[in-house]
Image (cartoon, rainbow, N blue to C red):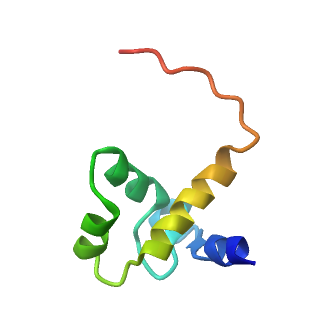
């Protein structure tokens, strides 16, 4: 039940951010949130920067990303 609630926080609409998955009610894409985290922003930093965003929203991004690649075979990225 909690998993479904988290996934419902992420929506996709072709008229919002070119259809990329976003946190419901925002224009913040899952990709953007994950990128912030990957570049060292803490969850608290992100929440302070984007009023209205919650830790649960960020957890929804993690879960959505996890589910998105669950059945994907990934190859290692090569250094440029």
Q: Residue at position x 59%, y 72% from top?
A: 11
Q: In the rendering, at what x and y percent does residue 66 appear? A: 63, 51
Frontmost residue, 24 versus 47: 47
Q: Residue at position x 40%, y 59% from top?
A: 33
Q: In the image, is 76 to the left or to the right of 7? A: left
Frontmost residue, 74 versus 44: 44
**With respect to residue 39, does 51 lie above or below?**
below
Q: In the rendering, at what x and y percent does residue 44 appear? A: 29, 68
Q: Residue at position x 31%, y 73% from top?
A: 47
Q: In the image, is 69 to the left or to the right of 28? A: right
**With respect to residue 20, does 15 lie above or below?**
below
Q: In the image, is 77 to the left or to the right of 66? A: left
Q: Quadrant location of the N terminus?
A: bottom right
Residue 16 seen in this snapshot? no
Residue 6 seen in this snapshot? yes
Q: Residue at position x 48%, y 59% from top?
A: 30
**With respect to residue 2, does 78 lie above or below?**
above
Numbered marks: total:
0
Q: In the rendering, at what x and y percent does residue 61 appear? A: 52, 62
| Res 29 quadrant in image | bottom left
Q: Quadrant location of the C terminus?
A: top left
């Amino acid at each position: 039940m909690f998993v479904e609630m988290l996934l419902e926080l992420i929506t996709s609409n072709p008229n919002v951010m070119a259809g990329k998955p976003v946190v419901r009610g925002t224009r913040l894409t899952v990709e953007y949130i994950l990128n912030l985290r990957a570049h060292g922003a803490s969850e608290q930093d992100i929440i302070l920067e984007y009023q209205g965003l919650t830790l649960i929203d960020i957890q929804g991004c993690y879960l959505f990303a996890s589910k998105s690649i669950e059945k994907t075979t990934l190859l290692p990225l090569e250094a440029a």
